[in-house]
Image (cartoon, rainbow, N blue to C red):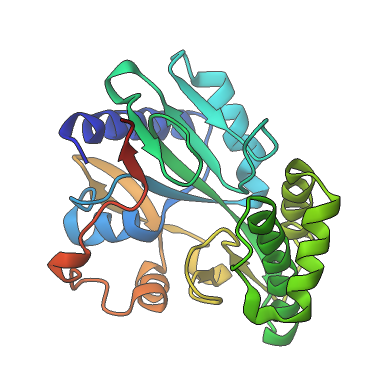
């Protein structure tokens, strides 16, 4: 990742931090960004985005904070349901001239971005959680098929046929809308739940968050400022990565999202 892109991303993150603090929105650095905070006290050097988690009940406050405080024309919030955008994640996207040639390989969006993941409730009891996860997986496979990828989810057998049927009879916007709706199905649960990132790239149950792990935050230094990670970050990151304090092999230290637009 070019140094200028890194600098723009960090400037955007620090501005977002001030927005969320001003509106008292609870959030956490998660994933690789949480590792960066704990291990590097900043961004992992080869990383090319920032990951933030916000409980679903705080997402509307996050949107209001951004809309109320953002004053930069080159910075915008990309939301599920926006035209041509079919993911369930939110992106704070900086498209200033200095970084416009950077392109997100997954969406084709220009610029650098902060991924904001909604953490939704699902069942703590594994059999019911598996049914919820399978429903979301079916939505995601249908979207992949609609985008021309017929190989994803082949191991699902007859469920893959259902995904193909869904892709043939619904628009991508409709599929994405149903995906978000299904993700939020069980946010009413008063007990017996965990928080889960249904947009996680990791295998099932790697990126789950027990309520006690995200009930409070641990403040960590990140690029010269203080940022929150979940109080239970050690259990969360160990579940996701194993020995997260050990950097990966040098061959695996690669940016995963951005590419130069030629």
Give the quarter of the figure containing the N terminus.
top left
Question: Picture quarter containing residue 18?
Answer: top left
Rendered view: 190 above or below 149: below
Picture coordinates of residue 103 (x, y %)?
38, 35
Rendered view: 121 above or below 178: below
- Residue drawn where x is 67% and y is 49% of the image: 57
Give the quarter of the figure containing the C terminus.
top left
In the drawing, does residue 24 fall left or right of residue 255?
right
Rendered view: 57 above or below 213: above
Picture coordinates of residue 37 (x, y %)?
26, 54
In the drawing, does residue 140 fall left or right of residue 106?
right
Picture coordinates of residue 142 (x, y %)?
72, 59
In the drawing, does residue 55 fall left or right of residue 163?
left
Picture coordinates of residue 151 (x, y %)?
59, 68
Question: Picture quarter containing residue 232?
Answer: bottom left
- Residue drawn where x is 33% and y is 46% of the image: 227
- Residue drawn where x is 27% and y is 50% of the image: 47
Residue 197 seen in the current view? yes
Residue 189 seen in the current view? no
Give the residue furthest to the left: 250
In the drawing, does residue 45 fall left or right of residue 105?
left
- Residue drawn where x is 66% and y is 37% of the image: 60
Rendered view: 261 above or below 119: above
- Residue 231 vs residue 74, the one in the foreground: 74
- Residue 13 vs residue 94, the one in the foreground: 94
């Amino acid at each position: 990742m070019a140094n200028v892109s890194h600098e723009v991303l960090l400037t955007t993150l620090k501005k977002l931090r001030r927005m969320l603090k001003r509106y008292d929105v609870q959030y956490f650095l998660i994933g690789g960004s949480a590792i960066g905070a704990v291990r590097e006290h900043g961004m992992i050097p080869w990383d090319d985005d920032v990951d933030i988690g916000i409980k679903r009940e705080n997402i509307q406050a996050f949107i209001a904070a951004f809309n109320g405080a953002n004053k930069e024309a080159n910075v915008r919030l990309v939301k599920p349901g926006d035209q041509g955008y079919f993911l369930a994640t939110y992106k704070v996207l900086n498209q200033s001239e200095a970084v416009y040639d950077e392109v997100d390989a997954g969406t084709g969006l220009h610029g650098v971005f902060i991924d904001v993941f909604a953490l939704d409730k699902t069942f703590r009891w594994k059999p019911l959680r598996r049914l919820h996860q399978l429903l979301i997986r079916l939505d995601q496979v249908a979207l992949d098929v609609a985008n021309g990828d017929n190989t994803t989810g082949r191991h699902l057998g007859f469920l893959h046929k259902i995904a193909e049927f869904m892709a043939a009879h619904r628009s991508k916007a409709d599929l994405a809308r149903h995906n978000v709706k299904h993700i939020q199905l069980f946010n009413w649960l008063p007990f017996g739940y965990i928080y889960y990132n249904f947009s996680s790239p990791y295998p099932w149950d790697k990126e789950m968050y027990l309520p006690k792990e995200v009930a409070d935050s641990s403040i960590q230094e990140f690029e010269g400022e203080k940022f929150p990670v979940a109080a239970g970050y050690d259990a969360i990151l160990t579940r996701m990565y194993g020995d997260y304090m050990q950097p990966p092999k040098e061959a695996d230290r690669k940016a995963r999202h951005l590419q130069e637009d030629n």
